Image: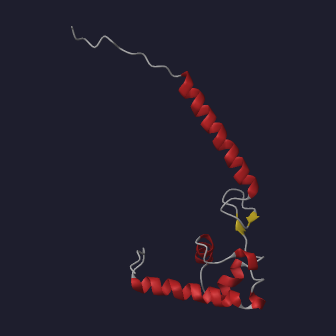
Amino acid sequence: MKTIRDLCPRCYQQEEAYFRRVSTFLRRRENRQSTIAETSSATGVSEQRILDYISQGRLQLIDLPNFEWSCYFCKVKTRYGKLCKSCEKQMSKDLAEHIEESDNKRKQTYFVRNDHDGRRS
């Protein structure tokens, strides 16, 4: 079976080796309480790579209670997505307002049909 990857075979093998290091470390019961920073330090795998494994679904947070990262906007610690619940709610509200504003502008715009294009019939 053929698969498509964005990495060459050598880079793919290296990426898998990084993942195995993190996975092996976190499988040990005593390491499940570690943070992302502690896991990174212990395995030599960057925090960003570990976050990528989480977003790809390769690491499950259910057994890792101390895995948290900063919200993209307010920097509050969160475990879900790139935004904390508060910023996510605010962004949804802002987006809804923008859509409503856009719809209102569209309703206020009118078009005039120009039957006079300069041609004689």
Q: Is residue 95 above or below residue 62?
A: above
The quarter in which the N terminus is drawn is bottom left
Outermost residue toward the top in this view: 120
Q: Is residue 72 above or below residue 36?
A: above
Residues 31 and 76: in front is 31
Q: At which x and y percent is residue 104? A: 60, 28
Classify residue 11 by image quadrant: bottom left
Q: Residue at the location (74% across, 65% down)?
A: 78
Q: Residue at the location (35% across, 14% down)?
A: 114
Could you tell me how many numbered marks the image carries?
0
Outermost residue toward the front in this view: 1
Q: Is residue 19 above or below residue 87?
A: below
Classify residue 47 by image quadrant: bottom right
Q: At which x and y percent is residue 82? A: 65, 62
The quarter in which the C terminus is drawn is top left
Q: Residue at the location (33% across, 12% down)?
A: 115
Q: At which x and y percent is residue 5? A: 42, 75
Q: At which x and y percent is residue 28? A: 72, 91
Q: Is residue 63 above or below residue 81?
A: below
Residues 4 and 23: in front is 4
